[in-house]
Amino acid sequence: MQVLLAVLLVIIALVLTVKLRYAGKAPMKLTAESCDASLWKHVYQPERLRVIETCTAVEGRVVSVRQARDGDLHIALDPDHKSAVNLANALHDEGDLIVEIVCEHSAEDDAPKSACSGFVSKVTPPKTGDRIRVTGAYVTDIEYGWNEIHPATRIEILR
């Protein structure tokens, strides 16, 4: 019985540690005016994104940059504040926060093309290795469970 109780306490301690380490909280709350709400018109399937914070800013180092088939640019960001990622980020993205610039390039698939029709993003993409501050909506992609900045309103290169 004591062994079972000890195992249960260890499991509870591990769960609490993981929840604290991967809290999935925005580092800061910005006013709604600090983000471009009109970008939501160009998000493909916005219903898959649960908004946690309408506007936030996150700083960190760019780990990778890749073009997605839906026309968005996907940026993997190693955030300075690790609390910005949740457990799904840690398991699937090595602890990186996903940042998406909508309509950064032409969509390869037909379905997302309507979201970007007549619109091209004005957000300047960073390069791998850049240290950046990204401003945008802080969301959970409910399809995958990880947190993202999507859509990104602005990306500033930090020195």
Image (cartoon, rainbow, N blue to C red):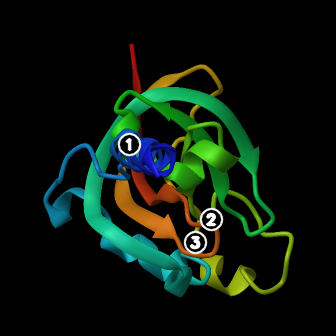
Q: Which residue is located at x 26 percent, y 59 percent?
A: 55
Residue under numbered circle 1: 13
Disc 3 marks a residue whose amino acid type is Phe
* SS of the residue under disc 2: loop
Q: Nearer the viewer, residue 25 or 110?
A: 25
How would you rate the neighbour count of disc 1 (Cα within 10 Å): few for under 14, some for 14-19, many for 20 or more?
few
Q: Is residue 14 left or right of residue 36?
A: right
- Name the residue tied to disc 3: 119
Q: Earlier in the sequence, mark 3 or mark 2?
A: 2
Q: Which amino acid type corresponds to the residue marked 2 in the rendered image?
A: Cys
Label 3 or label 2, whichever lies nearer to me, is: 2
Give the residue type at disc 1: Ala
For the view shown, which residue lies furthest in the top direction?
A: 159
Q: CA distance from mark 3 to mark 2?
A: 7 Å
Q: Tell me the SS state at disc 1.
A: helix
* Rendered residue at 49%/53% (across/down): 122
Residue at position x 64%, y 67% in the image = 144
Crowdedness near tag 3: few (<14), some (14–19) or many (≥20) residues, C-alpha within 10 Å: some
Q: Are marks 2 and 1 in contact (CB under 8 Å)?
A: no
Q: Tell me which label, 2 or 1, sits earlier in the chain.
A: 1
Q: Which residue is mark 2?
A: 103
